[in-house]
Image: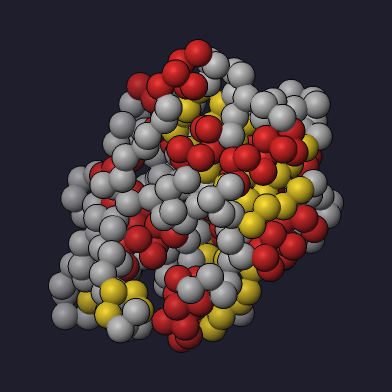
Amino acid sequence: MTKADGMLTRRKIRLEQVELDDPRDNEVLVRISSCGICGTDRGAIHGLEPYPTPGVLGHEGCGIVEAVGREVTAWKPGDRVMIGFAYCGYCRSCRRGQHRYCENGAKLNFSGYRMDGSSGMKRRNGEAVAGRFFQQSSWATHALAVENQLARVPDGLDLDTTGPYGCSISTGAGTILNELRPEPGSSLAVFGAGNVGLAAIMAAQLSGVTRIIAVDKDRKRLALAKELGATDTLVHGAGTVLEIKDLVGDKLNYSVEATDGENLVSEAVAALGVLGTCAMVGGAAATEFVKVNHPDFLLHGKRLIGVVGGGGQTPMFLEALMDLQLQGRFPVEKLMKTYDFADIDKAIDDSDDGRTIKPILKMNG
């Protein structure tokens, strides 16, 4: 990541008209209503994530099905859907139900093209565009997606709050509900009160966790964390680990490192008690390393696990989270601010600078 005059520099973003092919046999054409801006999009913009240009980003899209391929039976025009993670469906991980760890995931999500090398998107002059970011590229008015990526949005739920379930929200919630699965009476510390960390806090509040500690530098985000279920909040500093131990002793069961580039994994591990588990889900640079104190880690039986996208992101899981939101028990809308599609640069700047937790780009009415 480079800086100029104290500000992040990034690849140029320009809105222009492109052409989409008709959906293939297993694909669905979705009229995008809105799409979230995620840390992974921003990473691609700032050169931290691999993605070719010219290309279209966006992987938290939601909208209305307009057309389906010949083999699609689960969806029909008019269905309200959000678009999830891309996976092949046939590799070893997919056959185990671990779609987030698809062996073809890197190609499907970051190459900009289908597995056969085609895109389905081109400029008016015929130039190919990398238009398959996470097999959707939904910073657009329309997107092609594979039918197994979609989840149904329940009637009565604001469609434009559902796109982020495709990545950031399911990452935080899935880390708690799919991976850590905390037992009743346990304690949890979440490092980072951004969209992923706050989703983890909301999910923990639905579980049997009785002590939920939010850690962040931003007092406004900590206040929101408290509103969403945190029992305690700490402003991050040099003494954070000791402050956690003052709250729960040496008995912290779980920690989640969900910062956006800070890499507080060492602290999240150090704060754990005996047999504690730290889930590493944050967006530190690919060149970062994690350091742990060997005697503390070994003699106290601590565990450190990496979690991609909240683990098992199935349509059933995504639809369950949306049902919880509809019931008022998972209020992700409190994280969001909507921007017109034309204001995409401002939305990205606000996300980079921390002014907005989850920007939502509004494409169609």
Give the tally of numbered discs: 0
Residue at image x 26%, y 69%? Answer: 2
Q: In the figure, is residue 303 to the left or right of 19?
A: right
Q: Position of residue 95 (x, y in %)?
A: 42, 22
- Image quadrant for the C terminus? bottom right
The quadrant where residue 94 appears = top left
The quadrant where residue 195 appears = bottom right
Q: Is residue 299 above or below residue 306?
A: above
Q: Could you say which is closer to the camera, residue 90 or residue 243?
A: 243
Q: Could you say which is closer to the camera, residue 291 or residue 112?
A: 291
Q: In the figure, is residue 252 to the left or right of 147?
A: right
Q: Could you say which is closer to the camera, residue 219 or residue 296?
A: 296
Residue at image x 41%, y 30%? Answer: 292
Q: In the figure, is residue 175 to the left or right of 325?
A: left
Residue at image x 45%, y 78%? Answer: 349
Residue at image x 62%, y 25%? Answer: 273
Is residue 184 in view from this perspective?
Answer: yes
Q: Position of residue 275 (x, y in %)?
A: 59, 18
Q: Position of residue 337 (x, y in %)?
A: 63, 74
Q: Position of residue 158 (x, y in %)?
A: 72, 65
Q: Is residue 171 above or below residue 142?
A: above
- Image quadrant for the N terminus? bottom left
